[in-house]
Image (cartoon, rainbow, N blue to C red):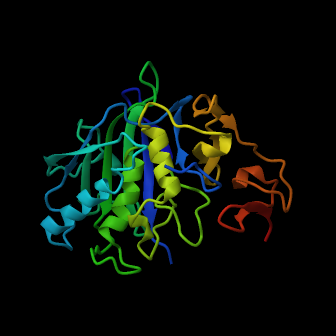
Amino acid sequence: MTTTASSKGVLAAIGLGLVVMAIAPLGANAASVSLSGTKVVRWQTSPVPFVLHPACSSDLPAAACLDEVRKGFQAWVGPSCSSLVFSDAGFSNNVKLISAGYNENKKNEFAWIENSAWTYGKYVLGVTSPLYYASGSQTGVIIEADIAMNGYLQSWAMSGKSYSTDVMNVAVHDIGHFFGLQHNLFPNAQKPETMAPTADPFMGSRTPEADDIAGLCFLYPKGGSYACTSNNDCPKVVGDGPQGEVYVGQIPCQSNVCAGAPTAVQTGGKKLGDSCNSDADCDKPTFCQPISSSQAVCSQD
């Protein structure tokens, strides 16, 4: 995730939603969130409205394509542990989205970019840009979020066939960014979570996994808090490292609730063969290499 300051005292957090690949407690593949200062980035109220571009992708019939996007939002609604609800607020012909470098307009818009305004390259399929307060009493509160889809360098489908650029397979992931989830940096190799950094070519990104749902319920817990028995039940915090996204902390478990300032994630000091969370943990020239769905170690070429 790239974070840049805007001119209005808010941060535009640009989540590079997906790139092409060639409830339960959080486990080793914990869901990830981001912070503004010590505050978790999320919406403060629900339902959260969204607005769709009426044309959808030019590759597809508009009505059916828009229904796939709506299904993408609904994929996150329904878990008994979550209070999050979305509302369909109609249509907008605007394609000057925050995700494409334009200013906010107080609408949460979802659109395909079909021309050279798309600047992220062929293999980025979607970009999500939540805008949130960086200071004051509402620090971390999202006030607007746009989702831009790559209609310029990709051809889209709704078939659900493996290795296709499927609308729902991408939309569900980017909608996760829309409400505050970040990438799971060590996804399950056999059955990747929806919030894995890359799209599952076998369409698994369409359906949130247990850790995805746990992250949703941490952000929007029904009853006001997310229960835990240890820090491992709570989300990790993603930030920017010198080589991209890294885990920079973890929300602590305090009095059986995931809350409070994150505990620090060790950086450096890990040797060849030591367990790790990110490349930042490992002494150079070693790097953090996942060896299973739940473990990674410092490795060397």
* Quarter of image, res 112: bottom left
187 to the left or right of 67: right
Name the residue at 62% across, 29% down. 261
Q: Nearer the viewer, residue 92 or 122?
A: 92
Q: Is residue 208 above or below residue 23?
A: below
Q: Quadrant of the C terminus?
A: bottom right
Give the number of marks: 0
Q: Is residue 196 above or below residue 134?
A: below
Q: Residue furthest top?
A: 137
Name the residue at 45% across, 26% down. 139
Q: Nearer the viewer, residue 176 or 118?
A: 176
Residue 113 seen: no
Q: Nearer the viewer, residue 115 or 273?
A: 273
Name the residue at 40% across, 80% down. 162
* Quarter of image, res 102: top left
Q: Is residue 110 above or below residue 179?
A: below
89 to the left or right of 213: left
Name the residue at 79% across, 56% down. 275
216 to the left or right of 30: left
Place of residue 197 in the rendered image (x, y in percent of width and height, measured from the top left): 51, 61
Residue 161 seen: yes
Place of residue 20 in the rendered image (x, y in percent of width and height, measured from the top left): 45, 71
Q: Is residue 293 above or below residue 48?
A: below
Place of residue 136 in the rendered image (x, y in percent of width and height, measured from the top left): 45, 19
Place of residue 250 in the rendered image (x, y in percent of width and height, measured from the top left): 64, 40
